[in-house]
Amino acid sequence: MVIIGELKKEFQRRGGVLKTAELNQLGFSSRQIKNLLDEGVITRIKRGFYELTDYVNREEVVIARLFPQAIIFLESALMYYGYTDRIPTAWQIAVDKNSTKTQYEIDYPTIEPYYLEPKFLEIGIVKIQTEGVTVKIFDRDRTICDVLRYEKKLEKEVFNNAIQRYVKDRKKNIRKLFEYAEILNIRNKVQIYIGVWL
């Protein structure tokens, strides 16, 4: 069986989260996992997923481990790109509308799932490596399309800041923006809100 020091290294190598099956592969039986829980060495995040009790995980890494298909979305993506100064109260993630809703009922980290058509989930994904884990996020151009699509869900200040900062961003890709807008059926909105600044 792996000693505690090795176990901690394994947690850190995998972004701070291990599944039951991964603990089993390391030589931990169900009883030993229960003992680790009882001793406070590990904490259950949700059924079948554990984290080290004394290790601070980056929340986006935990989300990527719990929900590998989820994509960092809307205000959470705006924060990543520096398009907002407001920290969202929950991590907004885009998920398949056909996925089981109950799996997203977790206490930590706080998430707010948006259920999208599967065809819209593949548009504009960027994969970022953080702490050995692949975190999916929509690129900046797709994120602005989402801002326009979900305008009514955003505070006016957040909406306006996002548009203004995107327009000034040297990394924006207008060709991609209009490509996405066409697919997402918001080309007119892009013309109205962003076309005037270009």
Image (cartoon, rainbow, N blue to C red):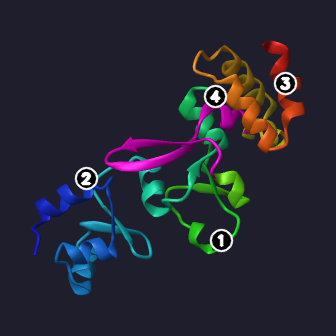
Q: CA distance from mark 3 to mark 1?
A: 34 Å
Please indicate whether residue 56 sits to the left or right of residue 189 in the image. Answer: left
Please indicate whether residue 181 sits to the left or right of residue 39 in the image. Answer: right
The local crowd at label 2, few if under 14, some if 14 to 19, many if 20 or more residues have their Cα within 10 Å, is: some
User: Pointers 3 and 1 in contact (CB under 8 A)?
Assistant: no
SS for dot 2: helix
The answer to which image quadrant residue 77 occupies is top right
- Check disc 3 and report the residue beneath it: 193
Kind of residue at badge 1: Lys
Mark 2 vs 3, N-terminal side: 2
Quadrant location, the C terminus: top right
Residue drawn at the location 61% of the way across and 27% of the way down: 85
Q: Position of residue 33 (x, y in %)?
A: 25, 78
SS for dot 4: loop
Mark 3 vs 1, N-terminal side: 1
Kind of residue at badge 3: Tyr
Q: Disc 2 vs disc 3: which is toward the camera?
A: 3
Kind of residue at badge 4: Thr
- Check disc 2 and report the residue beneath it: 12
The local crowd at label 4, few if under 14, some if 14 to 19, many if 20 or more residues have their Cα within 10 Å, is: many
- Check disc 4 and report the residue beneath it: 84
The local crowd at label 1, few if under 14, some if 14 to 19, many if 20 or more residues have their Cα within 10 Å, is: few
Residue drawn at the location 48% of the way across and 55% of the way down: 63
The answer to which image quadrant residue 145 occupies is top right
Residue drawn at the location 70% of the way across and 26% of the way down: 175
Q: CA distance from mark 2 to mark 3?
A: 44 Å
Which mark is on residue 101?
1
Q: Is residue 138 magenta?
A: yes
Magenta-drawn segment: 122-145
Mark 4 vs 2, N-terminal side: 2
Q: CA distance from mark 1 to mark 2?
A: 29 Å
Q: Disc 4 vs disc 1: which is toward the camera?
A: 1
